[in-house]
Amino acid sequence: MGPGNETAVAEFILEGFSGLDQRLQQFLSLLLLLTYLTTVTGNTVIIFLMCVDHRLQTPMYFFISNLAFLEIWFTSSTTITLLVILSSGRRPISLSSCFAQCYFYSALGYTEFSLLVVMSFDRYVAICQPLHYAAVMRQQLCTHLVVAAWVLGFTLSRYHLVLLSKLTFCGPNKIHHFFCDSSPLFTLSCSDTSLLWKADPILILFPLLGSLCLILVSYMGIFHCILHMPAASGRKKAFATCSSHLTALAIVYGCCIVLYARPTEEVSLETNRIVVLLNNVLYPFLNPFIYSLRNKTVKLALKEAIGRAKVRLFPQS
């Protein structure tokens, strides 16, 4: 990707949390493994239920299942690498693999921003235009919105490859992180990265703040409609419908703003690692509980699915 005749470094060494005690690293490895397995299982269950239960085949749950699918890949893109580092020590990674990991991580992040915008629009139509909801949120439109979110996310992330392709590495190759992020790569580069340090947060903040503004516009309309509802029960139900989405927004955008609200060069790598770990592990882990597993319809669908599985495995004689 870069100019090969100028690049002396052929691979990097991911150090993860090498400063931690060995026993603490083993405990973190076990905790991380359990969290990862729970995350993958929980999000997979959501996708399965959306596919087999007709009550959940609605636009809202269609978007939630797509978000669950994304979260599986998003957490896998970094968590598996960290598990390998914690269990076996430092991990070497080739230059091309490092760039690819950085690209897919940012692409999945941008796709998540796009999906959250789509979900806020869905909630706006459901609450503010309930009589027109079925006519507006048709399956064809929902599919187009999801495809557009994925295409937009992977297209926006191409700038990462453009920035990385301009870097040369001829010195230290130890990355003090658990995956290949742009900040530690800029630090290791022997190129002039002063412009890249300024351009990278701007290019990240543009889709971040752009998506956040669109979401805020949707929720301003939603809150306006809720406050003008005549019945208190209707207002309570509407707020309950939005609470899951608002919780997710607080976690995702809160972590991202901590990282990118100021120039990336001013954010220490230690802060970067901790916040990224929370965003990559905690939110995907909470996603099934935030959106679905506390919902009565989903819990009923899960209970019925478990009942059918028991009948198939243990048929009565």
Image (cartoon, rainbow, N blue to C red):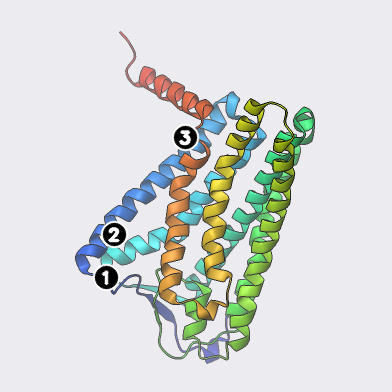
Residue 308's quadrant in the figure? Answer: top left
Whether residue 142 sits left or right of residue 10 in the image: it is right
- Residue 56 visible in rendering: yes
Q: Mark 2 to mark 3: distance in Å? A: 26 Å
Residue indicated by mark 1? 20
Image location (x, y in percent) of residue 13? 37, 77
- Residue 179 visible in rendering: no
User: Does 104 appear above or below 34?
Assistant: below
Q: Quadrant of the C terminus?
A: top left
Q: Mark 3 to mark 1: distance in Å? A: 35 Å
Q: Are marks 2 and 1 in contact (CB under 8 Å)?
A: yes
Res. 293 mark: 3
Q: Mark 2 to mark 1: distance in Å? A: 10 Å
Residue indicated by mark 2? 28
- Disc 1 crowd, CA 10 A, few/some/many (<14, 14-19, 20+): few
Res. 33 mark: none
Choose the circle earlier in sequence order: 2 or 3: 2
